[in-house]
Image (cartoon, rainbow, N blue to C red):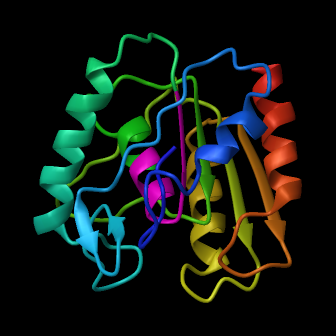
């Protein structure tokens, strides 16, 4: 589980039990490597929503990909909120990356940056996308665009919109838990 900008590795940890209540999988919640005072972290610099800064994104993406590849598990779900959703998309859909068993994106977008290239060829993993209709930070249009791109590429997509802002919806968490249980 990859946290959002300004949070830390503890932020989404409770979601692990909500998504996998029987603890059939190992859960990891890494900390973004870039400091964001007063105690938070982030994965890359933001100058324009939808376009991660390539100077900060490239080395973090490479480092997190290396860490992820070192984990002793062959079955992986990638999930995240906001910037963490962007990292989940990037790691699960990047050219040359192993495909995860699923991607879960809470209020994020598929990155558009010179530091990353997506692979939308067949064998895409199933993807769950949840987005707040009133999100002032990452517009719901980014969630809709991700859904269109992935569906057009042949991915199985669970898509939900909620009457919320930039936050997690408990209903979507429950929907994702049920969805993951069917995969």
Residue 23 covered by magenta stretch: no
- The location of residue 78, given as percent across then percent down, is 51, 37
Q: Nearer the viewer, residue 161 or 145?
A: 161
Residue 119 visible in rendering: no
State the quadrant of the C terminus: top right
- Name the image quarter holding residue 56: bottom left
Q: In the visual, does 101 lie left or right of 156?
A: left
Residue 84 covered by magenta stretch: yes
> Where are the magenta residues, as a range?
77-88
Q: Give the residue at x 61% y 89%.
A: 136
Q: Find the residue positioned furthest to the bottom.
A: 136
- Name the image quarter holding residue 52: bottom left
- Name the image quarter holding residue 42: bottom left
Q: In the visual, does 145 lie left or right of 89?
A: right
Compared to residue 180, the image places residue 134 above or below, namely below
Compared to residue 182, the image places residue 65 above or below, namely below
Q: Give the residue at x 50% y 27%.
A: 122
- The location of residue 104, given as percent across then percent down, is 62, 44
Residue 110 visible in rendering: yes
């Amino acid at each position: 589980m990859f946290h959002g900008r300004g949070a830390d590795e503890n932020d989404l940890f409770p979601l692990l039990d909500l998504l996998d209540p029987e603890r059939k999988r190992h859960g990891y919640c890494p900390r973004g490597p870039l400091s964001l005072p007063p105690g938070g972290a982030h994965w890359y610099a933001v100058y324009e929503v939808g376009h991660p800064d390539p100077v900060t994104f490239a080395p973090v993406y490479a480092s997190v990909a290396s860490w992820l590849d070192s984990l002793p598990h062959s079955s992986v779900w990638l999930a995240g909120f906001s910037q963490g959703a962007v990292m989940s998309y990037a790691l699960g859909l990047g050219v040359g990356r192993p495909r995860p068993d699923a991607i879960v994106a809470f209020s994020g977008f598929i990155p558009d940056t010179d530091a990353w290239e997506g692979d939308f060829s067949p064998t895409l993993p199933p993807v769950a996308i949840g987005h707040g209709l009133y999100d002032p930070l990452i517009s719901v249009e980014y969630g809709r665009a991700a859904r269109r791109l992935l569906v057009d590429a042949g991915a199985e997509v669970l898509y939900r919109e909620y009457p919320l802002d930039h936050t997690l919806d408990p209903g979507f968490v429950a929907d994702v838990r049920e969805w993951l249980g069917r995969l």
